[in-house]
Image: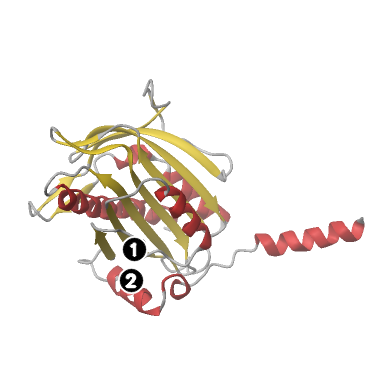
């Protein structure tokens, strides 16, 4: 019995040791070089891929948990639009190693602080100006009553979490969403699904449960790789696919900047 306990203890020590994959292992040398160059250039946001016909994952990092998470997010959706993004957050000096438990918990807590999304901005290429993305954003008690709640806090890091949010953005209006979170030693994933129909003005654009946005935050030793994807089955209206695709690209870039600001606070 003592030998079994000793063997289990040794196995647990190895199992809980964090070995972060390198950026090259996650995305390949060529994309890794592009991402590093983009992170050092103020005018570049990363790598974006917009697909409006027979969409499939093209930028997905080599991470088994993420592959399963994305297939679950896409399951039953039959999407007409897919926008993917790869972004790189370079850790500052003093943190050029795998994140520790305290850093991972702090990052997770900030990704659940959905109230801080209110007021974030993105650059509108069509207007040539910065524009507010989310006018309001807050966690709610559920999709029926939609009573606002404070952003959550955690005594320990949960493996799974479900949150509901009410968010008003300047493209798709006031909507209710469900957020699903999954965490592991080297990753934080969350998905966003619309529980109400999304419209552009008075024109219905995406029916309820037909939109998913996924953000994957993966520790890559000296940096953090962010993979983001917006998946939707959009209405068959002329020009709607292009409008939705462009809006999703802005959405991914804005959320990336939001996360980057929080990461700065964690790694300062």
- Side of 59 relative to 10 (left or right): left
Tell me which residue sits at (36%, 52%) in the image. 259
Split into 4 quadrants, where in the image is the N terminus? Answer: bottom right
Task: Name above or below for residue 232 compared with residue 86.
Answer: above
On the image, the x and y values in percent for residue 129 come to 10, 52
| Residue holding disc 2 | 35
**Quick check: marks 2 and 1 in contact, CB under 8 Å?**
yes
The one nearer the camera, 235 or 27, is 235
Q: Secondary structure at mark 2?
A: helix
Residue 161 x, y percent position in the rendering: 51, 40
* Quadrant in which the C terminus appears: bottom left
- Above or below 218: residue 175: above
Residue designated by label 1: 87
User: How far separated are the C-alphas under marks 2 and 1?
Assistant: 7 Å
Quarter of the figure with residue 43: bottom left
Residue 121 image position (x, y, % from top left): 21, 48
Number of residue marks:
2
First along the sequence among labels 2 and 1: 2
Choose between 114 and 103: the one closer to the eye.
Answer: 114
Please give the name of the residue rendered at 40% of the width and 55% of the height, measured from the top-left corner.
263
Q: Would you call the spot at circle 2 few (<14 residues within 10 Å), some (14-19), or many (20 or more)?
A: many
What residue is drawn where x is 37% and y is 40%?
193
Report the residue that reaches farthest toward the right. 1
* Location of residue 194 in the rendering, given as x and y in whole percent from the top left corner: 33, 37
Q: Looking at the image, is 225 positioned above or below residue 128?
A: below
Task: Identify whether 268 is placed above or below 134.
Answer: below
Crowding around mark 1 (Cα neighbors within 10 Å: few <14, some 14 to 19, many 20+) is many
SS label for mark 1: strand
Label number found at residue 228: none
């Amino acid at each position: 019995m003592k030998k079994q306990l000793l063997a289990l203890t040794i196995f647990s020590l190895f199992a809980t040791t964090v070995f972060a994959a390198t950026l090259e292992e996650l995305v390949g040398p060529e994309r890794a070089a592009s991402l590093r160059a983009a992170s050092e250039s103020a005018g570049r946001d990363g790598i974006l891929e917009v697909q409006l016909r027979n969409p499939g994952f093209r930028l997905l990092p080599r991470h088994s948990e993420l592959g399963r998470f994305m297939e679950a997010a896409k399951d039953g959706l039959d999407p007409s639009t897919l926008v993917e993004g790869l972004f790189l957050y370079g850790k500052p000096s003093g943190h050029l190693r795998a994140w520790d438990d305290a850093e991972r918990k702090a990052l997770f807590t900030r990704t659940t602080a959905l109230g801080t999304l209110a007021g974030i901005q993105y650059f509108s290429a069509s207007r040539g100006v910065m524009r507010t993305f989310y006018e309001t954003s807050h966690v709610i008690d559920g999709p029926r009553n939609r009573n606002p709640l404070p952003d959550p806090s955690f005594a320990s890091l949960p493996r799974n979490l479900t949150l509901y949010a009410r968010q008003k953005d300047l493209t798709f209006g006031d909507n209710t969403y469900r957020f699903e979170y999954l965490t592991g030693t080297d990753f934080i994933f969350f998905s966003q699904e619309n529980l109400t129909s999304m419209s552009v003005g008075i024109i219905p654009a995406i029916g309820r449960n037909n939109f998913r946005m996924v953000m994957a935050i993966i520790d890559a030793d000296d940096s953090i790789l962010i993979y983001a994807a917006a998946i939707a089955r959009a209405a068959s209206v002329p020009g709607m696919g292009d409008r939705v695709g462009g809006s999703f690209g802005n959405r991914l870039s804005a959320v990336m900047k939001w996360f980057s600001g929080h990461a700065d606070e964690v790694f300062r």
